[in-house]
Amino acid sequence: MSLATADLERIIRTVWSTQLGLDLSPTDASGLAAALRAEDTVLVKVHFVGEFNGRLEQRCSRHVSLSAAAAAFAASGKDMGTSDIRDTAAEMAHMTAGNLKSVLPGRCEVSNVEPGESFENARVIAVAGFTFEGEPLAVEVIQSSGSPVTDR
């Protein structure tokens, strides 16, 4: 199964623009997700189950997460707590995943993924990279041919 990067990018930009009024700038995604793994980032995973099994992983810099929370709560960044930042990032990832279902094959549901879960035979099928005020945001869609397994 392949997922067009253009579809993923369009969905992400639409969700962030519509919900938060934030204009994301597309950027070369190669290496962006890996670079974000090493930085102070907020990571959210959303699980797809059904005819399509896999997950969406959204990673963004703390600045992007803080800006998103400030926009969501119509507040200044200094008023945002850690839970506000995390909740906003999770909400954006879930909205993206919910919209992404329309371009995935078959029927699937969206749910939370507990930390420590991984997938057998997983492969990245699409990656989108963005910047907001010079800071990175990357989203990967990963497909699995098996069910989630716990790697604890």
Image (spheres, helix red, strand yellow):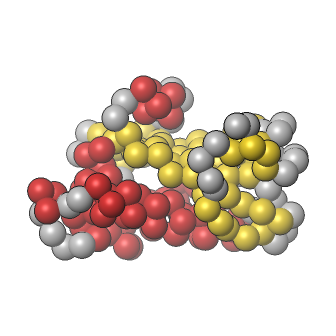
Residue 142's x, y, as percent?
Answer: 70, 45
Q: Is residue 115 visible?
A: yes
Residue 115's x, y, as percent?
Answer: 59, 47
Apparent side of residue 68 relative to residue 48 in the rendered image (left or right): left
Quadrant housing residue 100: bottom right
Quadrant housing residue 81: bottom left
Q: How many marks?
A: 0
Nearer-the-camera pick, 47 or 116: 116
Apparent side of residue 134 relative to residue 3 in the rendered image (left or right): left
Apparent side of residue 127 relative to residue 84 in the rendered image (left or right): right
Nearer-the-camera pick, 23 or 151: 151
Q: Is residue 105 visible?
A: no
Nearer-the-camera pick, 75 or 81: 81
Check the picture and name the quadrant holding the C terminus: top right
Residue at the location (63% across, 56% down)?
Answer: 113
Residue at the location (47% across, 46% down)?
Answer: 43
**Measured along the vertical axis of the image, is residue 2 above or below residue 78?**
above
Residue at the location (19% across, 73% down)?
Answer: 74
Residue at the location (61% across, 62% down)?
Answer: 112
Residue 57's x, y, as percent?
Answer: 57, 48
Apparent side of residue 146 relative to residue 140 in the rendered image (left or right): right
